[in-house]
Image (spheres, helix red, strand yellow):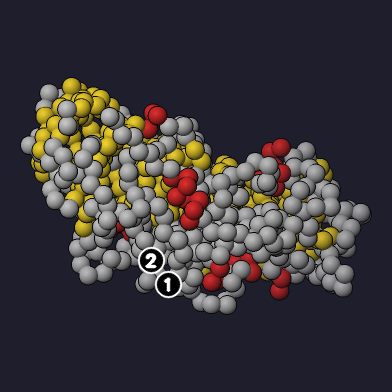
Amino acid sequence: MKRTITLSLVAVCLASAPAFAQRGPGGGGQADGRQDSLDPSPIGAATDLDTDKFINDWRKSPVRTVFGKLAIQDMLTKLEGPDPQHPTRKGAVLTGITAISHAMLAAGATASGREQAGERMVFYTVSGEGTLSSGGKNFDVKEGVGFTLTPDFDFKLTAARALEFYVRTEPIPAGTPSSPDIVVVSRWDNDRRVGAHWAHIGNGGPQGLSLITVAPRTMPQPHSHPGEECWLSVKGETILSLGKVTLKMTPGMAYKIPPSGIAAHSNINLSEEPIELIFMGPANNGGGRGRGGAAGGPGAQPGQPARGGQPATDFARLDNSPYNYGNEQDIDMFMGDWHNGFPRIEHGNMYFRDMLTALAGNDPLHPQRRGGVLTNAQAVSFVQLEPHSSAHPVEGDLKGVQETFIVNSGAGIIASGGKTTELQKDMAFIITPGLDYKLTATGEKYMTFYAVTEKLPEGFTPNSTLTVVDNRNKPQTTDLWVDKERPLITKADGLSQYASLTQVEQGNMTISRPYSDNPGVEEIWIATEGDVEMLLGKELRKLPAGTAYRVPSTGITAHTQINVSGKPAKYIYLVK
């Protein structure tokens, strides 16, 4: 009699998912577990683990032969060295599992025998066709079929077409009953089910090798936890974010999550088709996730505010539950591209095209118009000034607001109070009500700017003179793992609402640390150079230059940028 056992990743993941308390109008909350604990310190800190040691490709390993004809090449093997966080050899990282391997059986070849005492081998078929025989029973073997070999029976495996497998080898957990019959399962017998971490879709598999698919243009929740958890790539290319390292992951690669308890990981699918991965959890539960984790960790400084006013010990409040269309924010309402904004004229000759505008409606979490999301500003805009034309004061242009400009391209001069300054890219200045000035585009191309129109709070006194700020050569600091930052203009220079307009530079093949703000915080990002991907909430969007977004201030809305464009990207960031 055929015995079919399927593993429900959904049950395992949801059983270990932390509960969330309701908090505020956003309906979010902070996890009571630590699956959202992401190390906040910049990349390259002395405490960072060598992530490369935890990743390997079977093609880089020597071949060993078992059961007569079965060729095995290991991806991950038993830990070498006394410290599981600092293995002495690449791929030698496993503590509960013995090996994670790739196996081949040539067409027409046969492998046979019995697994050695105290050990079991779990197989998942990637390609080929063949027959598995044991105890007088025969089973078809093809893609998606898995089986488990134990010391309780003999078997024979014959390949009609070359068979390819992924294999998990491990000690049999204490108390496991004997298995007189071979266990064979097929993922084709199961419907797909959404598991945890927003986007993991389970499709069953043999005990300990669970097939997970990730839909096109989807990013599973970056999260962390202790315990032994491994993943391997079966089909399609993903962007692996592991710890603070980002790299392409292709079929045949496997990794173990470094056991620090705060090593973030996510397999991001930026392609147009679903990708397939195999998930492996601890041997004693066949695939479940550990729960909990460090609340602090390397680089943590308890109580020190991080970006957005969030204490460093919180790291990132990332809602662990699957995506729910009815409950999630409509993130597209919080985004805008200047190319879609209708031009308006200010200061005589300047074309303004708005990316974001003042809140439309009364609820900042549910704006009534796309891009109408700002509470402390009236607009975030892209601005153009025609060559040889000039901007100047126009009666009625600035009513209860001031405008901060960051030069984006072109050449020009600005004159005020008897002083003339040559403007260059990334220089900044503020135009306030009643200021006498003349801004002229002197080159042969349009001058362009990014502009923030701030509301003037009661009691605030705007600058009465023009100050041009040139912070281009100020030192950069590193935040959110990889972001190189420098303020281009600050409140000390005359901003009325925001602490600064900060330039953020992100290198290629990097992901900034995902995080969330406290409820009510207004955080705005403007993409100025590059063509990157953005995570906002639980969804991915493209973020080309000239696009801006505000983070919905629920207190639990994840956001980050992912740069795999081939060149650095730049942004302007502001928060209150």
Pointer 2: what residue? 260
Quarter-wise, where is residue 425 in the image?
A: bottom right
Q: Residue furthest right?
A: 395
- Inspect this view and state whether residue 482 appears: no
Tags 1 and 2 in contact by the CB under 8 Å rule? Answer: yes
Q: Quadrant of the C terminus?
A: bottom right
Tell me the amino acid under the disc marked 1.
Pro
Tell me the amino acid under the disc marked 2.
Ser
Pointer 1: what residue? 298
Left or right of residue 24: residue 241: left
Q: Quadrant of the N terminus?
A: top left
Left or right of residue 146: residue 312: right
Residue plotted at (80% across, 44% down): 368
In the image, residue 314 above or below residue 335? below
Residue plotted at (84% across, 67% down): 457
Left or right of residue 55: residue 449: right
Residue plotted at (30% across, 54% down): 283
Within 10 Å of disc 2 (Cα), the crowding (few <14, some 14-19, many 20+) is many
Name the secondary structure under disc 2.
loop
